[in-house]
């Protein structure tokens, strides 16, 4: 376990051409839910998993002809760390709210449409949860909406609202 307040950073540079490796690397970083500090510098809260993932991405960058370095660092102030964590949390909040809206929209559909939407949205919740390092109340609201959507097959449409 890393020290509390430690972040794993990836400093990288990928050649512009061919573009496919650069796009694949960016997509992988996005799936991890990194915070982009500046171009070519991303961060995640440090633990064994995030450190390993950043090391894998660094290898991918080098294989694509680029340069990469993985660092462990601590922000110089608690304000900087709070801002970094808040930026990451805000991104996840938006994703959870999108799931909530989609679940509520799907609730008006027929039973088959609701079941299909529920399966799709459960998978989306799992993807979001993998990059949710700072759990939010919106997580539970989105889960409740998807559960209500699943249960609505027998009862008719149900809407779940998020309370701010």
Image: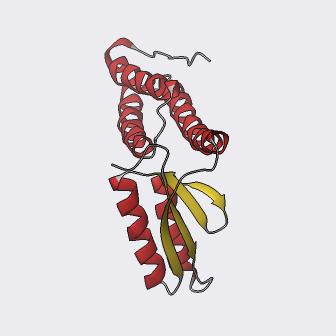
Quick check: 83 left or right of 73?
Answer: right
Where residue 149 appears, x then y in whole percent?
40, 23
Q: Quadrant of residue 4?
A: top left
Nearer to us in this view, 123 or 65: 65
Q: How many marks?
A: 0
Q: Is residue 6 visible?
A: yes
Residue at x 41% of width, y 32% of height? 113
Where residue 130 appears, x then y in whole percent?
39, 45
Q: Is residue 24 visible?
A: no
Nearer to us in this view, 115 or 101: 101
Quick check: 110 left or right of 153?
Answer: right
Quick check: 138 left or right of 36?
Answer: left
Residue at x 65% of width, y 41% of height? 83
Nearer to us in this view, 32 or 75: 75
Quarter of the picture holding the C terminus? top right
Q: How is the image coloured?
A: secondary structure
Where residue 125 appears, x then y in whole percent?
41, 38
Where residue 30 appears, x then y in whole percent?
52, 57
């Amino acid at each position: 376990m890393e020290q509390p307040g430690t972040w794993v950073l990836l400093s990288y540079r990928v050649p512009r051409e061919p573009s496919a490796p650069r796009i694949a690397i960016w997509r992988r970083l996005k799936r991890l839910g990194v915070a982009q500090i500046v171009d070519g510098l991303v961060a995640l809260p440090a633990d064994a998993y995030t450190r390993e993932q950043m090391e894998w991405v660094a290898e991918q960058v080098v294989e694509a002809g680029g340069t990469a370095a993985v660092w462990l660092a601590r922000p110089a102030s608690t304000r900087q760390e709070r801002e970094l964590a808040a930026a990451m949390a805000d991104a996840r909040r938006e994703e959870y709210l999108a799931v909530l809206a989609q679940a509520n929209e799907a609730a008006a559909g027929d039973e088959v449409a609701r079941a299909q939407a529920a399966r799709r949205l459960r998978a989306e919740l799992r993807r979001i949860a993998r990059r949710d390092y700072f759990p939010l109340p919106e997580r539970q609201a989105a889960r409740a909406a998807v559960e209500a959507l699943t249960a609505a097959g027998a009862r008719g449409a149900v809407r779940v609202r998020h309370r701010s």
